Image: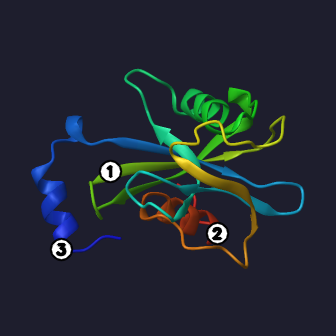
Amino acid sequence: MYNETSKEKFEETSMSDLPIGVNAILINEKGEILLGKRKNAFGDGEFSLIGGHLKDGERIEACIVRELWEEVGLKVLEEDVEVVNFAFVGEGIPMIEIGAVVKKYEGVPTIKEPLYCEKIGFFRLEELPKIFVGTRVNLELYLKGKFY
């Protein structure tokens, strides 16, 4: 989360150099959230929301659609994605993280990037595993009902 060290890193980073992460908040019909266990990347062994980095000129909703397809094989339409929160994450590499709720999807999540994801599944909100710092803030804001 935010601390003096992250403040210093943020002040040393120009906004044009700041990576932007986009995270899908996808809840199934049982009220469980979709998470993936990270592998061979920062946060190895921790669970995170499905997502990735926004490409130059890409719409946030399009990024969510792309990442869900590339990483777990889910079909989503842009109109079924709603941006709900923004956060600055200062641990590790300073980043802007955007959380977006996915209201509707088709398919069953499967691992499509086994080099970077060890496991995927739906988890009860009351029994979440250790969550990766890069997506933790977006998830916490969502669970507290704090939307921008």
Q: Which residue is mark 2?
A: 143
Q: Residue at x 59, y 32 (%)?
A: 61
- The label shown at residue 4 is 3
Count residues near mark 3 (Cα–Cα under 10 Å), then give few for <14, some for 14-19, many for 20+: few
Q: Earlier in the sequence, mark 3 or mark 2?
A: 3
Place of residue 143 in the rendered image (x, y in percent of width and height, measured from the top left) = 64, 69
Secondary structure of the residue carrying numbered label 2: helix
Place of residue 16 in the rendered image (x, y in percent of width and height, measured from the top left) = 22, 34
Place of residue 3 in the rendered image (x, y in percent of width and height, measured from the top left) = 25, 74
User: Is 95 or 80 nearer to us in this picture?
Assistant: 95
Q: CA distance from mark 1 to mark 2?
A: 21 Å
Which amino acid, by three-letter code, is at mark 2? Answer: Leu
For discs 1 and 2, the disc positioned in front in the rendered view? 1
Q: Which residue is mark 1?
A: 95
**Residue furthest out toward the right:** 29
Q: Is residue 35 above or below residue 23?
A: below
User: Is 111 or 31 nearer to us in this picture?
Assistant: 111
- The label shown at residue 20 is none
